[in-house]
Image: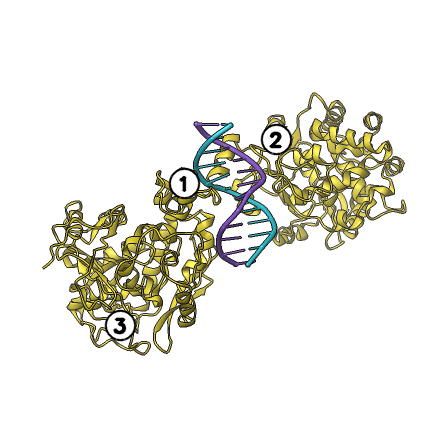
Chain colours: A yellow, B purple, C cyan
Amino acid sequence: MTDELNRASAEPETMQPEETVLVGADVVTVIEDNAVENSAPGQVTVELLPDWLKPMEEDEDDGGEGVNRKTNNDVPKVKRRRGRPPIARNARLGLTRLDFKKGLHADHPKTKTVHTLLDRTRSSLTSGTAIPVPDPTRMPEVLPQTPQSIIHSPTSTSQRPRLIPISPTGDSSLSKIPDTEFHSPLRLTRVSPLGIDKSVTQNFIHSPAVKVGNVTQQIISSTGVGNDGTEPPLRLWLCPSLEPISPTKSQDTFSDQTVSLPNFPEITRNGTATLKESLPFLSKCESCGGPFSAQKIGDTLCYRCCRIKPEKKHSPPNIVFRKKQHTKYKKMVKTDFVPDGDEDEDDWAAKKRNRRMCRQCVACLREDDCGKCDFCMDKPKFGGSNKKRQKCRLRQCKFQSKLHAHRANGMLNPSLPRRRKNVKPKLKRRGRPRKRKFKSDPWEDDDEVSDKDDDDDEEDLRHYKMNGRKGGRRKWNYTFKEDEEDAFVETVIDDDEPSITEEDPDILGSERSVMVSSEMYSNTSGLGAQGLYYNVPGVPAAPHMLGSVPLCNTSPLPMGEVISSLPMGDDVTQNGFLQIEMVRVGSPPSHYTEEAQNTEQHVSEFQLEPTPVITQIFSLAGGENDSDRDQGLMELFTSLGQTVLPAHWVGVMAKGPVLQLLQCSKLSTMADTVVQIEKGFFYQVSVQNQPLLLMHAVYSRHPTCLETVGDVVSLLLDLEEMGVCQGYQNFHMGPPWEPRMSVRAALCDLLIPKDEEQCPKCTQPVES
DNA sequence: GCCAACGTTGGC
DNA sequence: GCCAACGTTGGC
């Protein structure tokens, strides 16, 4: 192989099959190894092919031992690497020697041959000898170096070109090319044979100054098609693969041709300096076949075709993309991308470690384990057996955690039972048995909830549909269905709206709020913005059902039917009755009444739920008049709709007028909390239909009037740090055979710090 | 498709 | 070496 290289270096530029090496010594090493193994110097490239093909599958997760691993062709599983892929270092090393503008790689101390060749190439370019008219007499010399056996899989080499992100883990020699982020594998870069033949025969005169890197590739690819030796050696001039060509701005003067003339990317890059000064010459348009006067090397399309082609954006497979932007790369490589050479090692490691953390949510910011959840109980420090080896549930990121992602679907369907065999109930549920209709807390399965309940749930809630997914563009639409006994909320998903569920908590909160707000607003324009009511039929509206008594719909109302008992007019906003109706959409109040003690876990587990979009609006308002409008509130409402609100908070204009801020996620501890801003921007907080007493500390921490978006946001953020008081169990209520229920003290604080279960009043209630 | 179990990996 | 916990996988 060394001989081969030497000979190649002595040969004209078109002679070097090994010139894939041109970028780095590592590649050379690979080739040499192969040569040794194969003991077939003339067929070196033959053995390279499998290695080049393999990385398509193996690179993704592979570390960087690719070169050494290349012999392990039969290893099905790629061992996950630790730390930074070596390629990154190599890439960095290579980058330091890379001339990005020219797309040339600086000489490498170990690649003497390559260095020579590169120099030669450069000199040829700069010396004005760039117009490379292939010497037919030479070309045959090249072909003999491309034995038939090179064609390990002709189809794969020529028919499956695809851009792949360069992987720092790549065991392919290609992947070690530092200056490319996307590239086509060498033997995959070839365009269709027809196209090549055509272009070759017609435009060989435009062949760029030979670059060593081109030859090998072309040899390989050409062998995939022409095996009878009749294949024009000119093909070797085509499809330079190793030289990254970007159709982007880096191609200053030849950017047009770069896109439209994939067969000559080399020209555009290397020939930029001098070739463009070449005199016009007659050529034949590759597209329309008509003659045209080429203005520079590489012009294979006439002026007319040149104007059309770039728009098609047919990214030819042999185009090698130079790394320019990170964003594109990320999109191409899914989420578990392996950083490229630009990535700092530490950054990469940090990313990998923390990719299950957004580092922003409450869970991520939480430092201590709860010690109660199943994962905590599994930890040795809590006496567990360390079988699960998972982070405390309360510390599972709400947005990035796989745990949440998995649970998203399940949890979004409250009816689906969640069996957790090994989980012991941490908190005894107090009060009456949970209403299974609205069970939404998976922790319920941990306690006395039986499988029977699960079955019943499935049966009873067969119409209760809620769907969602982690990403994508969907929005939630709620419709209402009715069972024999109950009415349900059904969620359908539209595909238009962006769903930022897991992507960015901030965006999630803001965009959803905007979306919901605007939609609500628009939908109700005909009704008058002041007449909005979000009302779920079938839910008893009686205030006495709130609080400690779980909602149980024993006599459901027809869908859309106005609940007669609903207070109308200003009462709606004053007694908070409306709020509980709204809450019902996203969060069954029963959950909080029955299992309020689980609020914290509940929240931590399920805040992944995307904010639903309420499209069903039932207006209970009759004729509104302009007196219900308030310009100030409307302006604030509009501003809120354009502002980043805490996640899942939405603004709603309702009759009153009153601007209401709702936490639409049932996973939030504030799901039952409503902030009402009335005329004059006075506001009041209601929790589960009960007004938060003015003596509550919340009021003291915020202005009396929420006049600005900032005030509102501040309040919401403050509320998000709080939870709902769980009340206490009243053992003196009702007959002994009836389930116990939790009640609250008369002056219950309602909102308490998240880490507390009860307010002081409920902790020591005064039994009357 | 979910999840318990566990190999693995990075930090300390 | 220990610990935390991520990622994978086989069983269900």
What's the residue at 15%, 59% (across, down)?
A679
Between A584 and A293, which is closer to the camera in this rendering?
A: A584
Tell me the mark number nearer the camera, choosing from 2 and 1. Answer: 1
Q: Are marks 2 and 1 on the same chain?
A: yes
Q: Secondary structure at mark 2?
A: helix
Identify the residue at the far front of this view.
Answer: A736
What residue sits right under mark 1 in the picture?
Answer: A383
Left or right: residue C12 compared with residue A46:
left
* Chain of residue at mark 1: A
Q: Position of residue C2 (x, y in %)?
A: 47, 30
Tell me the mark number nearer the camera, choosing from 1 and 3. Answer: 1
Label 1 amino acid? Gly
Label 3 amino acid? Ser
Q: Position of residue A106 (x, y in %)?
A: 66, 25
Whether pointer 2 and pointer 3 mark residues with C-beta atoms closer than 8 Å, the reply is no
What residue sits right under mark 3 in the picture?
Answer: A619
Label 2 amino acid? Pro
* Chain of residue at mark 2: A
Whether pointer 2 and pointer 1 mark residues with C-beta atoms closer than 8 Å, the reply is no
Between A525 and A740, which is closer to the camera in this rendering?
A: A740
Q: Position of residue A238 (x, y in %)?
A: 76, 42
Q: Distance of mark 2 from mark 1, alpha carbons?
A: 40 Å
Q: Quick one: label 1 or label 3, which is nearer the N terminus?
A: 1
Left or right: residue A250 compared with residue A690:
right
Quadrant where the C terminus of chain A lies?
bottom left
Left or right: residue A649 compared with residue A209:
left
Q: Distance of mark 1 from mark 3, alpha carbons?
A: 55 Å
What residue sits right under mark 2 in the picture?
Answer: A86
Q: Secondary structure at mark 3?
A: loop
Quadrant where the N terminus of chain A lies?
top right
Between A707 and A550, which is closer to the camera in this rendering?
A: A550
Q: Quick one: label 2 or label 3, which is nearer the N terminus?
A: 2
